[in-house]
């Protein structure tokens, strides 16, 4: 899933983000609003990790959530 899709579906994905990174508050998620750089910064701040570590975690999360992203998932686009 690309970040344009994530940003567009942010309200639907916030629960999955909060489940993965429980230190993020509802306010943090509202401020992030699906923006990758904002999320990377918050992960670094809340978890005390490097940008590279945050990017790796974000890549993994994105890959895991691609198939459960709803109608914009790759599998469903191919089926259309």
Image: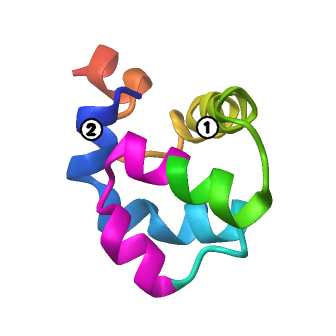
Q: CA distance from mark 1 to mark 2?
A: 14 Å
Residue 26 left/right relative to 64: left
Mark yes or no: residue 1 visible: yes
Label 1 close to label 2 by CB (< 8 Å): no
Residue 47 left/right relative to 79: right
Quadrant of the image occupied by residue 50: top right
Give the number of the disc on residue 5. 2
Neighbor class of circle 1 (other Cα within 10 Å; few <14, some 14-19, many 20+) is: some
Q: Up-down: is 32 above or below 8? A: below
Give percent across and percent down for residue 19.
69, 69
Which range is magenta? 26-40
- From the image, give the main secondary structure of the stretch colored magenta: helix
Q: Up-down: is 58 above or below 15? A: above
| Camera-side residue of 13 and 71 | 13
Q: What residue is disc 1 on?
A: 58
In the image, what residue occupies the spot 75% across and 33% down?
53
In the image, what residue occupies the spot 32% across and 59% down?
10
Residue farthest to the top?
Answer: 78
Residue 5 left/right relative to 23: left
| Camera-side residue of 57 and 15 | 57
Give percent across and percent down for residue 45.
65, 60
């Amino acid at each position: 899933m690309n970040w344009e899709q994530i940003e567009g579906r942010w309200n639907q994905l916030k629960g999955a983000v909060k489940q993965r990174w429980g230190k993020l508050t509802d306010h943090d998620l509202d401020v992030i609003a699906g923006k990758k750089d904002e999320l990377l910064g918050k992960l670094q701040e809340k978890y005390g990790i490097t940008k590279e570590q945050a990017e790796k975690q974000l890549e993994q999360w994105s890959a895991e959530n691609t198939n459960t992203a709803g109608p914009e998932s790759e599998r469903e686009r191919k089926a259309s």
